[in-house]
Image (cartoon, coloured by chain):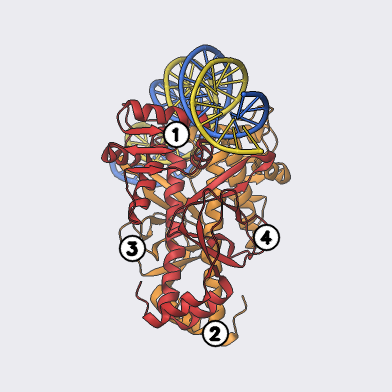
Chain colours: A red, B orange, C blue, D yellow
Amino acid sequence: MGLAAEDVERLDSIIKRSRPLHRGDHLFRGGERFRSLYVVKTGSVKTYAPSEEGGEQVLGFHLPGEIIGLDAIDKSCHACSAKVLETSAICEVPFQRFEELATSIPSLQHQMYRLLSKEIGQDADMLLLLGKKNAEERLAAFLSSMSSRLSKRGLSPTDFYLSMSRHEIGSYLGLAVETVSRLFTRFQEDGLLRVDRKHVEVLNLPALEMMAGSAPSSTHKQRSN
Amino acid sequence: MGLAAEDVERLDSIIKRSRPLHRGDHLFRGGERFRSLYVVKTGSVKTYAPSEEGGEQVLGFHLPGEIIGLDAIDKSCHACSAKVLETSAICEVPFQRFEELATSIPSLQHQMYRLLSKEIGQDADMLLLLGKKNAEERLAAFLSSMSSRLSKRGLSPTDFYLSMSRHEIGSYLGLAVETVSRLFTRFQEDGLLRVDRKHVEVLNLPALEMMAGSAPSSTHKQRSN
DNA sequence: CGTATATTTGACTGACTTCAATGTAAGTGG
DNA sequence: CCACTTACATTGAAGTCAGTCAAATATACG
């Protein structure tokens, strides 16, 4: 990270470590005042915006090492809600104190810029996915992303458990639950995966990544706007 | 903005003002090294990612007062390209120098965080649009957005020229050109707009905003995942 | 062990895309 | 100034992917 040892210590001193949270617990809800950023240590979290008519739009899934709440700095109150998907350890970083600290540590400042910028870049990838890719490519992209993010944390890139439901995956990818389910079945039939409920074994990662990279599998390509 | 006069002056001193740029000029291209942020003074700019097969995905349209390039801070090279849509005045802000300056002006630092965070929030809105809204709602949202952004700059919220083509609008909204064209026609038939080529007169802004707010107009609602 | 919830599977439908053709504006050069 | 070219926009017809509806399983949980 390029932080001196004493700086790391100072940063460490403002971080709050909570006891483990459990499935269904909220880190924050839409409308609440923004006070802290949250870092996932273990487990997983989803962020979502309650859309009209009770339905919810899933905005993202957050795995270990990832940060939650960056979108709330601007409005100083949360526009979305964050809910824990499985028993998780989450660190809380009070933003006000963090900002004061960052003022005196330029390299921390820079890291923060990069972090915010990275989030914007990832959103652009997602925009591309939702704007141009078909159902098959979307699920392939989702699984590829999970694979690479998990492996960054030293976990298996080809064998993992999905903590979110098919419905949540569908909401995130802009697809109906049924479509997600059918695709899992098809991917399995095609020998790309072995799926057992939440458990996924990726049998052909390169093929999955190829598919995700917006190379339509079939001869006809839709949505080539 | 909450900046002292002398700070404003310091900020002003690092900004480069270029001569007017013209339709088709690039601010930067994907792959180039990131050096500066760009602020639109007058005119408009589109950012886009060249997708495979020559097609391009439009990522955003940038109007006066808006900032371009925030996504490149992280990777220190541009992931997308930025092209001027009409004769425009653009300011260049060398990021390195900006960052140094921000270190000594905490309120500028804070503004920068807010700016980056706001961008993330807007991307989330767009995710929701692409994930859940139908064609009609998308175009309504696009027009509402244009209207409100223009009026923020003191321009008419109900009478404006679109500097981008129907094709670019379609790409941005994840729709085919033909769909966009048909919707313009329909909106006009329904008395929401008067359209003449690039010129748009909004006749019923509240109705348009209502439509954009994801309240399906017809009785049947698709994509209610 | 029974009830609620999640997932899967099938049949059908429709919104939007694709294909195709025409219309309109803008630009070029003789 | 007017053919010619090119790009953009509109409109119609037809096809398809993914959504909706419906029902059967499978799983979770009190």
Chain assignment, label 4: A
Amino acid bearing label 2: Asp
Check if mark 1's residue and mark 2's residue have beta carbons within 8 Å. no
The residue where tag 3 is placed is: B77
Chain assignment, label 1: A
* C17 and B120: which is toward the camera: B120
Label 4: element kind: loop
Q: Residues within 10 Å of mark 4 (few under 14, many from 20)?
A: some
Amino acid bearing label 1: Arg
Chain assignment, label 2: B
The residue where tag 1 is placed is: A197
Residue A94: image location, x then y, percent: 57, 71
The residue where tag 4 is placed is: A32
Label 2: element kind: helix
Residue B72 in view here: yes
Question: What is the distance, in whole Å, between disc 3 and disc 4 at their CAs?
Answer: 36 Å
Check if mark 1's residue and mark 4's residue have beta carbons within 8 Å. no
Question: What is the distance, in whole Å, between disc 1 and disc 4 at their CAs?
Answer: 35 Å
Question: What is the distance, in whole Å, between disc 2 and disc 4 at their CAs?
Answer: 33 Å
Residue B175: image location, x then y, percent: 49, 37
Q: Do labels 1 and 2 share a chain?
A: no
Q: Residues within 10 Å of mark 2 (few under 14, many from 20)?
A: some
Label 3: element kind: loop
Question: What is the distance, in whole Å, between disc 1 and disc 2 at their CAs?
Answer: 58 Å
Residue A207: image location, x then y, percent: 28, 37
Relative vertical location of residue B210 with respect to residue C4 in this rendering, above or below: below
Amino acid bearing label 3: Cys
